[in-house]
Amino acid sequence: MNAPVIHAQSVDLTFQTADGPVHALKDVDLSIKAGEFVSFIGPSGCGKTTFLRTIAALENPTSGRLSVNGMSPDEARRARAYGYVFQAPGLYPWRTIAGNISLPLEIMGFGKADRTERVQRVLELVDLAGFGGKFPWQLSGGMQQRASIARALAFDADILLMDEPFGALDEIVRDRLNEALLELWRKTGKTIGFVTHSIPEAVYLSTRIVVMSPRPGRITRVIDSPLPAERPLDIRDTPEFIALAHEVREGLREGHGDDV
Amino acid sequence: MRNVLPILTVLLAIVAIWYVAAIGMNSAWARDQAARAETELSAGDLVIQTLTQERPVLPAPHQVAAGLWEGIAGQKITSKRSLVWHGWVTLSATLTGFVIGSLAGILLAMGIVHNRAMDQSVMPWAVASQTVPILAIAPMVIVVFASAGITGLLPKAIIAAWLSFFPVLVGMVKGLRTPDGMQLDLMRSWSASRPQVFWRLRLPSSLPYLFASLKVGIAAALVGTIVGELPAGAARVWGQGCSRAAITGRRCRSGRRCSRRRRWRRRW
């Protein structure tokens, strides 16, 4: 149970670009256990998205060891270890919401009855029951993003990797979705890796916050959250929350010199 | 129904301009005739004479309509004097060429998107193929095919395909490449195979581009077919009447002016 689901050991990643090599990740060590909610926070270019992508086998580390569920990331991807949610919903406009959610299921070869049942179940999970027959453009941005989360959940991966999923939404919708995401996480017990720019979002959601800094992209601080599992939205006004947010801000400043 | 009124308005305007132009262009002949007969022409007579000439410089719309009507309804469809029959000859070659060209365009685009070697090599040749004047290519195609014993529909269809594959190719390359990195990454995160990515993502994304380029393609195919009918001297063509009239100019051998309509008739 307590064996790490995601284990990174001195992971390095260098991109070769026209302007010379870019050191995107340097010496990243991190273990994520089952059921954790880990946020990655840091300024642009700190490698938080890149790290999430290496976990998903969308990038390959230049050196170091990285295992997901005890396998290499590539094997884990083929074993459907994770669902990935991007900043944009990326729903196909020519498919209904239900059709979009069943797309990965079709690709993975689930049977038709199984697909229908799963689509129904994840739609309820993200509170979109009854919207399966609608097309993406008929839904608000927040609902579209929820549909894309449902799509990532449909094939029962244990790990949910989310790359600034609410970055493009307004504050009010974002609050509601944060609350819903916590609820979903409690219900399903998934391991979640969550990339964000927002300190309150990271503090509100996570059991652990990984603070990263750029040039080269590296982890500067890992903060365990003392907040209780039960988190109503107004927990954000408590002293514990504010102290934790302050600590994250300190961590960001430390990694970036004075220009934060 | 709402769309009919604007279309009719434009049509009426065109017909009106046409009539005015017919009166203007045919009046010289009418005046000349009147001068020879040493009669005075009233304005009314002038109008009537310009619009009813046997061999006008510009036939009036109703004369053209009568000619068309005779060519379409005045003959049996199987008759070689029937415009419908000639129309079908051209249309069948156009459609065949269009289908061949579109398929070639789509297949080449698929190759370009999926194969790096094709990506770097095909497009320059495709562009080059379109820079060669079709008027130069068409007779060669006709002659080469004829020497192999193939005449009729196929050589013309090949020329039509030559013109119509290009817009489809360009449109489909663009269309198949519309999915952005994020959507391709999503597919990758599901370990989708290349055919799955093609059928479920690339092809549906490219359809708007495909239909737009098919419109360009069908028009190009018709031009190609008519150009293909030019050098053939083929007996069965729709373009023949048009092209001969265009090439030989307005004067016939006899030096007398004659209308397109007449010349069409004489050929048939």
Image (spheres, coloured by chain):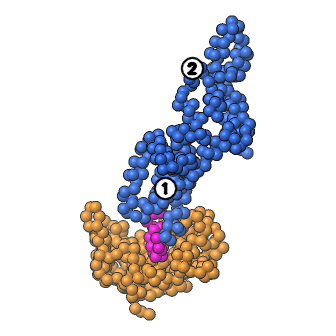
Chain colours: A orange, B blue
Residue drawn at x 55%, y 35% is: B243
Question: Which residue position is annotated with label 1?
Answer: B105
First in sequence: mark 2 or mark 1? 1
Q: Residue at x 61, y 68 (%)?
A: A96
The answer to whether tags 2 and 1 share a subunit is yes
Which residue lies most toward the left here?
A20
Q: Secondary structure at mark 2?
A: loop
Q: Which mark is residue B255?
A: 2
Characterize the local packing of mark 1: few (<14), some (14-19) or many (20 or more) Cα atoms within 10 angstroms. many
Q: Please, which chain is the residue tagged with disc 1 on?
A: B
Callout 2: residue from which chain? B
Q: Range of the magenta residues?
A: B179-194
User: Which labelled disc corresponds to residue B239?
Assistant: none
Q: Nearer the viewer, mark 2 or mark 1?
A: 2
Q: Position of residue A203 (x, y in %)?
A: 44, 77
Observer able to see residue A177: no
Is B186 magenta? The answer is yes
B65 or B228, nearer to the observer: B228
